[in-house]
Image: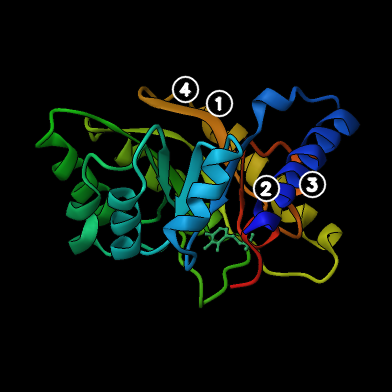
């Protein structure tokens, strides 16, 4: 558990260093501490070290942690999401990174309408077109964004990707770049209710490259909490 504090300090320092290298303001990159499969006590340690933003991938676990961890915490849901489970997240998460189909967006809209509120979402793009991963295709996201933009209880804030794993993080760079270019293309459409100011990309082993390519939300689990 002591490691979590020093891991966090190291990740934050490397995040700042990556920003310096490419002339970005470190305040433009938020660290999402991915606490999936780790106990609430681990989150408590990270909280004590000043981390306020956490990401979870499984609905039941996410809700249990939200109940177990009191205080000023911002929760993001980052995992594959079934429509019938959206209700459990209603009003409990600040952002959903993994919206990859219209039916899911419609259910999120329906649930947040009950609160008369809106939730921030990202559209997930499956850049490698890998069968095992969720996400719409790069071509599909343009169609999807036009439809999702019409739903009043969510706000499209940007794009998310989970690119293929590569031993050498440099090999992932073209995917990160592609996501940034896709966001710029969508931005140029000037759709109402659509902002493309968030790019959720980069994990423990490739976040420094993702930052160089414009990431604003790095989702980091292992490098903070250890192996799962
Ligand atoms: C688990 C997970 C992460 C964190 O991965 P690490 O390699 O442990 O940093 C990031 N994003 C998503 C969507 C995940 O499911």
Of circles 4 and 3, the one toward us is 3
Looking at the image, which is closer to me, 154 or 78? 78
Q: Secondary structure at mark 3?
A: helix
Ligand 1 resides in the quarter of the picture at: bottom right
Q: Find out whether the residues at labels 4 and 2 contact each other: C-beta distance under 8 Å.
A: no
Q: Residues within 10 Å of mark 3 (few under 14, many from 20)?
A: many
On the picture, is 18 further left or further right than 77?
right
Q: Secondary structure at mark 1?
A: loop
Q: Residue at x 41, y 37 (%)?
A: 73
Horizontal and vertical percent position of residue 138: 55, 54
Residue 148 in sight from this viewpoint: yes
Of circles 2 and 3, the one toward us is 2
Quickly name the residue at label 1: 188
Q: In the rendered image of this protein, does residue 152 appear above or below residue 15?
A: above
Q: Find out whether the residues at labels 3 and 1 contact each other: C-beta distance under 8 Å.
A: no
The CA distance from mark 2 to mark 3 is 20 Å
Q: Residues within 10 Å of mark 2 (few under 14, many from 20)?
A: some
Quickly name the residue at label 2: 5
If you read the primary sequence from the N terminus, does the residue marked by circle 4 or circle 2 appear first?
Answer: 2
Q: In the rendered image of this protein, does residue 50 appear above or below residue 220?
A: above
Q: Find out whether the residues at labels 1 and 4 contact each other: C-beta distance under 8 Å.
A: yes
Q: Residue at x 75, y 60 (%)?
A: 205
Mark sitting on residue 190: 4
Quickly name the residue at label 3: 208
């Amino acid at each position: 558990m002591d490691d979590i504090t020093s891991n966090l300090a190291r990740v934050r320092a490397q995040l700042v260093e990556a920003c310096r290298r490419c002339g970005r303001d470190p305040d433009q990159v938020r660290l999402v501490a991915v606490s999936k499969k780790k106990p609430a006590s681990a989150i408590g340690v990270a909280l004590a070290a000043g981390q306020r933003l956490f990401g979870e991938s499984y609905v039941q676990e996410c809700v249990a942690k939200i109940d177990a961890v009191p205080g000023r915490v911002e929760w993001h849901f980052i995992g594959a999401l079934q429509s019938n489970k959206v209700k459990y997240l209603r009003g409990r998460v600040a952002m959903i990174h993994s919206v990859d189909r219209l039916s899911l967006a419609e259910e999120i809209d329906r649930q947040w309408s009950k609160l008369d509120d809106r939730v921030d979402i990202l559209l997930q793009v499956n850049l490698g077109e890998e069968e095992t991963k969720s996400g719409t295709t790069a071509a599909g996201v343009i169609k999807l964004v036009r439809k999702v933009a019409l739903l009043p209880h969510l706000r499209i804030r940007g794009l998310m990707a989970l690119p293929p794993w590569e031993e050498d993080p440099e090999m992932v760079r073209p995917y990160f770049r592609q996501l940034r270019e896709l966001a710029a293309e969508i931005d140029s459409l000037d759709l109402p209710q659509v902002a493309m100011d968030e790019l959720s990309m980069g994990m423990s082993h490739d976040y420094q490259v993702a930052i160089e390519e414009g990431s604003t939300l790095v989702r980091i689990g292992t490098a903070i909490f250890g192996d799962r």
